[in-house]
Image (cartoon, rainbow, N blue to C red):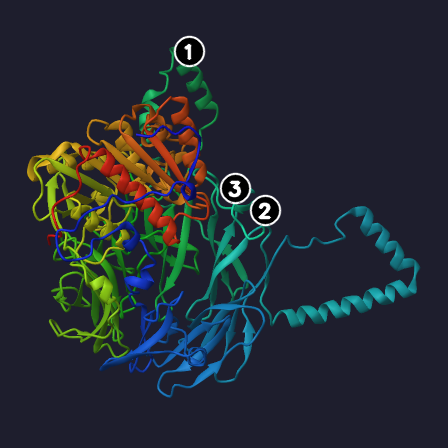
Amino acid sequence: MRKLSALLVFASVLPLAATAQTPTSSLAPLTVEKIMRDPTQWLGTAPSNVFWSEDGKRIYFSWNPDKNRQDSLYYVTPGGGSARKVSFREQQALPAGSGTYDERYTRKVYEKEGDIFLLDLKSGKVRQVTNTAERESNPDFALQGQLVSYARGGNLFTWNPATGETVQRTDFRKGAKPKNSLTDPEEKFLKAQQLALFDIIRQRDQDAKARERAQKALNKLRPKPIYLGQQSVRNLQLSPDGRYATYSLVQEPASEKVAVVPAFVTASGFTEDISTRTKVGAPQTALQLGIYDIGRDTTFVLGYRELQGLDEQPAYRKEYQLKAKAPTPADSAKAATAAKKKKPATELRRVQPYGPVWSPDGKHAFVVIRSADNKDRWIVGLDPATQKIKLLDRQHDDAWINGPGIGYGTGNVGWLPDNRRMWFQSEATGYSHLYTIDVTNGQKKALTSGKFEILNAQLSRDKKTWYLTANKPEPGQQQFYRMPVEGGTMTQITSKVGANEVTLSPDEKTLAVRYSYSNKPWELYVMDNKPGAKMRQLTHSTTPEFESYPWREPEIVTFKARDGADVYARLYRPANPAAQGPAVIFVHGAGYLQNAHKWWSSYFREYMFHNLLVDKGYTVLDMDYRGSAGYGRDVRTGIYRYMGGKDLTDHVDGAKMLAEKYGVSPQRIGIYGGSYGGFITLMAMFTQPEVFKAGAALRSVTDWAHYNHGYTDNILNEPYNDSIAYARSSPIYYADGLKGALLMCHGMVDTNVHFQDIVRLTQRLIELHKENWELAVYPVENHGFEEPASWTDEYKRILKLFETNLKPAGVGGSGGTGQ
């Protein structure tokens, strides 16, 4: 144990040595220094950002087999052969990987380096639409493909490929509309007097009026000026028939106090401040949907007062209403009298619209509307001619709306080829599935169902087939499927156990597949678009040094939580575990993330560290606790209003399972994790001291009232509206419960979970006279560490924490390198 005598223990002045361990095989033992090296130098860099050439003859991807500081663009042919690096000149000539296709997939319009280009897919000919110093963006086709539309400088333009004509379609202007200067009676009198007295003034006034009439005639050919005041516009688009221009009106909040992160180690030698973000509860950006009727030269802002449930207050508010003081008879009488005099107005919740999404024929449109508190998502049909909306679907959740294909904007949505039915994803059944709605009659149909999630959905180019990625076999797999457009049997195409990330070739006959397994990093494969077709490997990214160690395939186990829920976890065990041996539980971060799966983990350093721990005789458990992705709505929202509730008891129940089923000593269990995992570690060490003897909390949230709005408000609401949720969810309130050994590590330039978080907790521990803790700080690290030296130092400290506190004095690791 070490008592921290100063506030900070700097990583650079306390070098630590990993505990020596004699390997039980001929293999060189894993060490922290080895596994925390620069991964590009010894593990290898997996291919990423995969896309096809427009003719389907090449597969492009980012890769780094040369072990450079950054990835480069490579290509390989579907038939195989060696991958080739794409030269800078070749890259400049390539069309952008993203863009918009016309309805027949004969042309593609895209943005590249701030200009707009039009590609003819048959001939391969590229036409440059714009060539300006100002950036153009959001290219699309309009008027059934006759025009190309794009945004520039906050306005909408169209370009005619046949004539080369460019037309400005909107005229948004900052500030207020200029006022008529002659509104004051005194000013009118003075001008009339001047005109009556002076011939030259009268003549000039007549000339000015003539010029004004000419300008008005010219202006009739130009868009109407729309004055924005303090607002700005985003998401400019033209309806397919060219009649309407739609846009998001953006109102930024008044200047709010922003947290500042000081950087101490800088090139200038001076401390430099990094401006980061506001904290949860601060006013947020407001959006409105504006529509400009070009034909009638009028504008309007869409209203939503008739939305079902807009006047409903969140369910959690009832808890506070029950706690409020009961009114006395005198109070009731006064309230009744006041009610007769003035009827109280119903408070409506704030909403944010996304869209509209037009049918390709331009006859229909829908808008996705979300409540600002994310507890409701409405999909409404839009008739811009009447300025009316019609409810098509409402998804409500007392917690918050999210999930695969749903997200926080429009989500994954579109139109079926009949131009009457729109499609979307919803968690209405508890799992994200695919639905359609007929916008003319409101008829809704579920295309998929079951206790699995549709992770991604897209229509084939001929609009006859769905291509779906789903975890249908089990939560820990991702497979690729096809299904008829009207629904029916999901036919599985990929078959290798693990994760299959598929990119379709332009003709949809071939699949580029980024595939990985639990102990095999991602590689690029290709296969025919047929069920069970053979996958041919195109890349080999791992190094001989990495491959020389037999990396374990963790066992996927499940156990019952105390409330009956099934919890999935990765289990790593020594080949010959010692009776009553030590165990470590790892807590993944990010909140809504999955890690107990059968593909290569984004926590690859932790995965390698777990192999090292097993070599030293530890059993390791890595679970998808409540709040994790991959298991549906109830698991996702299981942490609502109480982080450190079910997510923590899942870890306590996991520790119990290790002791009862796998012979682990209940007195020798440690816990560690970063970010959200660091938060859970703190809650475990403060509130479950009899369960966890040692813990390492890395870049951890210590008080949710100091975290950001977008993440925290969904789960805990606003701190001034739901103080109960924040008090029971924040470790700083429970610090007095610390008994075991606690290590805290934090980057000093963390712009996500600010260094201030851990400093506040440190002061709290000092005032509580706690001794068995230490803080290691990393002066040049942000939330995600980058420097191998920092990773090495951090994990040496973690290993020493566990070796010191979870093993009897003088006992080293055992158990070999069992698979």
Mark nearer the N terminus (1 vs 2): 2
Q: Secondary structure at mark 1?
A: helix
Q: Quadrant of residue 132?
A: bottom right
Task: Specify few, some or many for label 2: CA neighbours under 10 Å numbering under 14, 14-19, or 20 or more.
Answer: few
The quadrant the N terminus occupies is: top left
Q: Amino acid at mark 3?
A: Val
Residue bearing mark 3: 258
Amino acid type, label 2: Phe
SS assignment at label 2 = loop
Closer to the camera in the image, 411 or 417: 411
Residue 515, position as x, y percentages in the image: 21, 65
Taking the spot 42% from the left edge, 86% from the top edge, the residue there is 125
Q: CA distance from mark 1 to mark 2?
A: 64 Å
Compared with residue 133, is residue 201 higher up or lower down, i.e. above or below? above
- Residue 367's tag is none
Which three-letter amino acid code belongs to the residue tagged 1? Ala
Residue beneath disc 1: 330
Q: Residue at x 90, y 58 (%)?
A: 196
Q: For marks 3 and 2, give the one nearer the viewer.
A: 2
User: Which residue carries the number 2 mark?
Assistant: 270
Label 3, label 2: how many angstroms apart (C-alpha)?
A: 21 Å
Q: Quadrant of residue 95?
A: bottom left
Reply above or below: 381 against 47: above
